[in-house]
Image (cartoon, grey):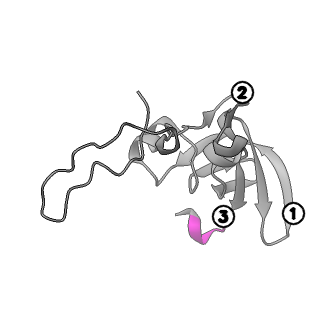
Amino acid sequence: MSVWHGHSHKKKPSGGRKRAYRGKRKFEQGSFPVETILGESKLKIEIGRGRTTKIKVLASKYAVVTDQKSGKTEKVEIMRVVRNPANIDYDRRGVITKGAVIETPLGLARVTSRPGQHGIINAVLMGEKEES
């Protein structure tokens, strides 16, 4: 089964249903979300429309963390996922998405990249005010 982003599921202005006038098309095909977890680095390269490539992080144990005050950036190990406001289930399972708060040796950091789309986990150190 695949994800499909077609438009024939909508109703007519009158409220009646639209009848299918054709089948599904390749350009309407989507993909399932990548749920990046903590673990040994594992990537998946997907070829998209026009032969564009998209690198998806399936699992990783490192993040590129930036300290905005000092301007320094370094690659550090992720100790654990503290919380994920995107989904309460992701929070419980420790899935890393954009906006997730991770614990690193430098302190708490918020993920700013989309690991399932960008192929890397970038994060920004959080200040004392944002931790609570």
Q: Which mark is residue 126?
A: 3
* Res. 125 in view: yes
Instruction: Determine crowd level at label 2: few under 14, some 14-19, many 20+ residues with C-alpha closer than 10 A.
Output: few
Picture residue at 56% right of the left edge, 57% below the top: 99
Of the two numbered discs 2 and 3 on the same chain, state the one appearing first in sequence. 2
Give the alpha-carbon distance from disc 3 to disc 1, as whole Å. Answer: 14 Å
Q: Secondary structure at mark 1?
A: strand
Q: Position of residue 40 (x, y in %)?
A: 72, 27
Mark 1 = which residue? 72
Of 99 and 27, nearer the camera is 27
At a point 12% along the width and 64% down the height, the residue shown is 14
Vertical relation: 107 (above or below) 47: below
In magenta, the rendered stretch is 126-130
Q: For marks 2 and 1, give the CA distance.
A: 25 Å
> According to the image, label 2 marks what residue?
40
Q: Give the number of the mark in front: 2 or 1.
A: 2
Of tags 2 and 3, which is closer to the observer? 2
Q: Which residue occupies 47% across, 44% down?
A: 28
Q: Residue 53: say if magenta.
A: no
In the picture, residue 61 is in which quadrant? Answer: top right
Q: Earlier in the sequence, mark 2 or mark 1?
A: 2
